[in-house]
Amino acid sequence: MRKPFPLRVGLLFGLSLAGLLSVAPAERPGPNLIFISVDTLRADHLGIYGYSRNTSPRLDQLLRRGTLFLDASANVPLTNPSFCSMLTSRYAHQTGATRNGIPMIAGNETLAQLLKAQGYHTAAILSNWPLKAHLSGLQPGFDLYDDEFSEKRWLFFNSERDAQGVTEHALAWLQGQPAEPFFLWVHYSDPHAPYLNHEEFSFRSGIPLSPEQRNLDDYDSEVAYTDHWIGQLFETIEALGLPSRSLIVFVADHGESLGEHSYTGHGRNLYQQSLQVPFALIGRGIPQDQRLDFPVELLDLAPTLLAYLNLPAGDKMLGLNLLPAVQGRTQPAERLIYFETYPGAVRQVKGAKEIIHTKKPIWIGFREGPVKISYSLRNSHWELYRLNADPQELHNLAKVTDPVFIAISERLLAWFNREEKEGWAVGETDALTEEDRKQLESLGYVDK
């Protein structure tokens, strides 16, 4: 077993006649960062967030050891755009990674790059095709960017690691006793559609099911299967003594609509089912079994983690450092939290190899406390909700003659116009292959 704080052997002045070497303790390294993420995971389908089904016993136990954010939102409900925003603390229209299949543009400094510059050993164990290095732009800063997976998870186009494979690869890296401090990112993809039913973790009743109920049951089965393998990962993390010298972060990139608003999937709208995500911090100095209910966004993730590691945020990072609020020193002021989304992925036209994309989002929106407004640029349609009274967003309060609505809508359009004037960045699709196109299409990420 690796010792927590290795000793360096140094030659001291005034060696004894016997020529003995003295052993001097090394300066204590900074904390490790273990970043565990799950694709397409709804916060409200975990027991610790109040779900009635037993989908997440191991995660519930783990997350009680730290601080849980009850109202965390993704800024864009698409996998690679969300991670690029998360790890740079910048919006998708600034990173250029606006859709799956479109990588981030150069010049966006990521959490991995900042940590690598501080001497961290860095590794990413991945499972989702849009996070492939040539499609994401997230590889810089990682010593290991493990995106070589070929398992047929759904017996057709998709070649992605399931939760067992992800855990096995992560355990192999950890058991190799990596130099500390390290940054390890482990990403699970199982709750992403199409959903599988795992017999050992099945929620099917045995009676004939509607397609909607089957989807729900199988989605929950995927969550429970992932929970089991995260539990296996954490058993080894504990056996290696890592929790005492690591910050553990748990998060999802976005949620998933399961029939709400007549839609199954994510990326095509900005309802809470797609935006609200689990987000938790576990580590020394982080209060245990604490639940914070003020709104936060995933742009806050990188500045908060850097602050915990006593490192400054990147120059272009926009999110807040949440650590003072986590530690009870201050409460964050109410602020606007902006959202955007794009048509899922690249768009196919004329032939399989001809791919185009547009810069503008299909929806934009913001929250200010419980007030949430969104606008469809594609359909010129407004929606306004008060989430404290209408958490399912069933009663649209947008009225074009209402002065309150007009004032709120003007603020959103002012933000959009200001951002558009600064320039709406978008990456290139030159690296997209025919295999990429097939994989993205099988995941629902090609608009035809």
Image (spheres, rainbow, N blue to C red):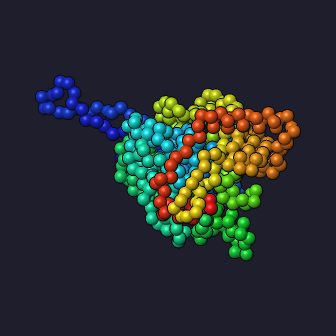
Question: Is residue 375 left or right of 421 when viewed as pictured?
Answer: right
Location of residue 217 in the rendering, given as x and y in whole percent from the top left corner: 67, 65
On-image quarter of the C terminus = bottom right
Front position in the image: 147 or 12 = 147
Location of residue 441 in the rendering, given as x and y in whole percent from the top left corner: 57, 63
In the picture shown, does residue 108 fall above or below 441?
above
For image coordinates 47% across by 53% down, the residue present is 430
Location of residue 48 in the rendering, given as x and y in whole percent from the top left corner: 65, 50
Question: Is residue 301 left or right of 184 when viewed as pictured?
Answer: right
For image coordinates 74% across by 50% down, the residue present is 379
For image coordinates 55% across by 45% down, the residue present is 426
For image coordinates 51% across by 30% down, the residue present is 315
Question: Is residue 2 left or right of 363 when viewed as pictured?
Answer: left
In the picture shown, does residue 194 fall above or below 233?
below
In the picture shown, does residue 64 fall above or below 9?
below
Residue 221 showing in the rendered view: no
Front position in the image: 111 or 202 = 111
Q: How many numbered marks are there? A: 0
* Residue at the right extreme of this rendering: 401
Front position in the image: 413 or 24 = 413
* Residue at the top extreme of this rendering: 14
Location of residue 325 in the rendering, given as x and y in whole percent from the top left corner: 62, 32
Residue 148 showing in the rendered view: yes
